[in-house]
Amino acid sequence: MIGDYTYYEFSSILAMQGFAGLILFSVFVLMALGLAIIFGQMGVINMAHGEFMILGAYVTYFTSQFFAAFLPDLFGAYFFIAIVLAFIVSGSLGMLVEWGIIRHLYKRPLDTLLATWGLSLILQQFYRSVFGAREVGVTLPDYLLGSISLTDIIEVPINGLVVMGLTTIITVAVYVLMFRSSWGKKVRAVIQNRIMAGAVGINTKMVDRMTFGLGCGIAGIAGSAFTMIGSTGPTAGQLYIVDTFLVVVFGGAASLLGTIASAFTISQAQSTMEFFMSGSMAKVLTLLTVVGILMLRPQGLFALKIRR
């Protein structure tokens, strides 16, 4: 016996908490991938990243409403179309923001922090004025409802499995794009030595714009995934932005492996501790642990050598 639980019940509950941590890990990875690309390459502190995520969530919500009203026979396929639309809309807005604001603030990280923080407030108010202050939720297709019973205690929600599968696909796609494509070589060249990359003919401004758009587009996909596990509101992105920055800094800027390892470590630690204490205390202890590790290893778990 462990407290009021048998060993079987205790291990089953821990397994369910671990799976809940995997769902949280999936959201963290999708959010942090885009932020790691943006922060790692350009040194831009994008405080509006959560709002790009919520834009993707709203796109998913309105896509579901459109299919329910005009294409009910195809309602089961709306989510996959919404993912593509969320990526396009969030990525396009990201490229517009890079052209209109960010490109004027390179090498001034504190200014990018203030500018994107102001942008986040503007977007929150825009969402509140256009979409309303009330939180909204999507109606999931029937095949995403329910759960799979592994034992008489452990049940795995199907939508959680879909979120993890989507995260795996996006992570592999980002890896192929960054490390197995000619465009990825240009991005890595700019990361390692921007001046030399420009000297050999790489259009560094276009690389920056496309990379910022890619990061924001991935945040939009994270928003689509978010609609399956939570409701969408104008300020919902603020709930994840701190954790996302924590994941990126802890993993090491511009490190894909570090981002994944950091997201897994933080999500599992937080989810497991929530079984023994309140959610707020679990978050505080996780934060203190990460801060302590960063004091010993300020470059993060994995760090790339970058020459500006």
Image (cartoon, rainbow, N blue to C red):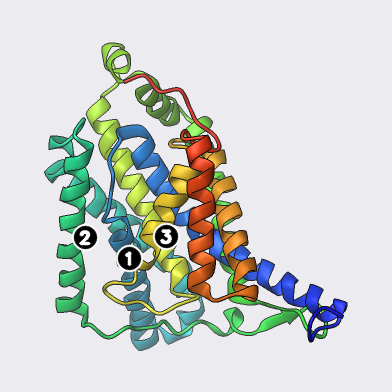
Q: Mark 1 points at which residue?
A: 238
Instruction: Say what secondary structure mark 3 lies in.
Output: helix
Check disc 1: other Cα within 10 Å, few if <14, some if 14-19, many if 20+. some
- Badge 1 or badge 3: first in the primary sequence: 3
Query: Residue 195: percent from the left, percent from the top?
Result: 27, 16
Instruction: Say what secondary structure mark 1 lies in.
Output: helix
Mark 1 touching mark 3, by CB under 8 A? no
- Badge 2 or badge 3: first in the primary sequence: 2
Query: Residue 308: percent from the left, percent from the top?
Result: 31, 20
Whether residue 179 appears in this view of the structure is yes
| Relative vertical location of residue 151 with respect to residue 163 in this rendering, above or below | below
Q: Which mark is residue 120?
A: 2
Viewer-proximal residue among 193 and 166: 193
- Badge 1 or badge 2: first in the primary sequence: 2
Q: Which residue is drawn at 41% across and 43% down?
A: 36
Q: Which residue is drawn at 50% across and 76% down?
A: 229
Whether residue 104 sits left or right of residue 141 in the image: it is left
Quarter holding the N terminus? bottom right
Q: Quadrant of residue 107?
A: top left
Whether residue 174 appears in this view of the structure is no
| Relative vertical location of residue 91 with respect to residue 102 in this rendering, above or below | below
Q: Name the residue under label 3.
A: 221
Mark 1 touching mark 2, by CB under 8 A? yes
Viewer-proximal residue among 38 and 198: 38
